[in-house]
Image: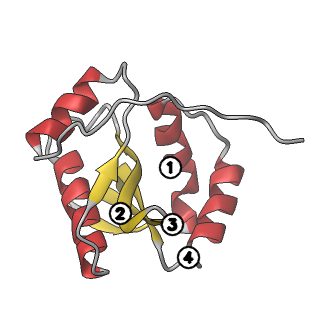
């Protein structure tokens, strides 16, 4: 299995995986997002490939707020249902942690919906701790 930066050619497979995660999106939209993200120095999307198959991806970035020191954050992680429980998720998380540490940051955070019990167990087994429970509010801007 190889882990590498996402490429434009991965758009269709990444879109399928995004839908598996519960975020349906077109391949064209993913293509546009890949192009926009690849110029950001504080952001990466890494993919895991098994032979020629994109088996999973992880989205990681550096978050800056005035009230706290910058930190790494996993924005999304998905492994295809065909490849779950094979170690790919663990390898992607480890690579995201290395990516954050290589940039000099000492902390990484991940948010997970309250209903994703399997994801919670996954992160707990990898040394993450639950640090807070919060509500998320959003508003569409016209």
Which of labels 3 and 2 is toward the front? 3
- Disc 4 packing (10 Å; few <14; some 14–19; many ≥20): few
Q: Is residue 59 left or right of residue 139?
A: left
Along the viewing direction, whichever of 77 and 53 lies nearer the viewer: 77
Dot placed on the residue nearer the N-terminal end, 4 or 2: 4
Dot placed on the residue nearer the N-terminal end, 3 or 2: 3
Which of labels 1 and 2 is toward the front? 2
Q: Quadrant of the C terminus?
A: top right
Point out residue 45 in the picture as x, y percentages from the top left corner. Answer: 44, 62
Q: Which residue in the protein does label 1 denote?
A: 14
- Disc 2 packing (10 Å; few <14; some 14–19; many ≥20): many
**Label 2's element?**
strand
Q: How many angstroms separate mark 3 from mark 2 (CA)?
A: 15 Å
Q: How many angstroms separate mark 1 from mark 2 (CA)?
A: 22 Å
Dot placed on the residue nearer the N-terminal end, 4 or 1: 1
Q: Which residue in the protein does label 2 denote?
A: 72
Q: How many angstroms separate mark 1 from mark 3 (CA)?
A: 33 Å
Point out residue 71 in the picture as x, y percentages from the top left corner. Answer: 35, 65
Q: How many angstroms separate mark 4 from mark 1 (CA)?
A: 19 Å
Q: Which residue in the protein does label 4 denote?
A: 40
**Label 3's element?**
loop
- Disc 1 packing (10 Å; few <14; some 14–19; many ≥20): many
Question: In the image, what residue occupies the spot 59% across and 79% down?
Answer: 39
Q: Which residue in the protein does label 3 denote?
A: 66
Question: In the image, what residue occupies the spot 71% across and 52% down?
Answer: 28
């Amino acid at each position: 299995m190889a882990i590498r930066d996402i490429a434009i050619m991965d758009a269709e497979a990444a879109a399928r995986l995004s839908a598996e995660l519960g975020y349906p999106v077109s391949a064209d939209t993913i293509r546009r997002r890949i192009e926009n993200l690849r110029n950001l120095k504080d952001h990466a999307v890494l993919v895991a490939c098994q032979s020629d198959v994109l088996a999973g991806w992880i989205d990681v970035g550096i978050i800056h707020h005035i009230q706290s020191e910058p930190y790494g954050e996993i924005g999304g992680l998905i492994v295809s249902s065909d490849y779950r429980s094979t170690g790919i998720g663990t390898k992607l998380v480890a690579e995201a942690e290395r990516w954050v540490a290589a940039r000099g940051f000492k902390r990484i955070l991940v948010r997970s919906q309250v209903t994703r019990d399997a994801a919670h167990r996954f992160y707990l087994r990898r040394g993450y701790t639950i640090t807070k429970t919060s509500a998320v509010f959003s508003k569409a801007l016209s």
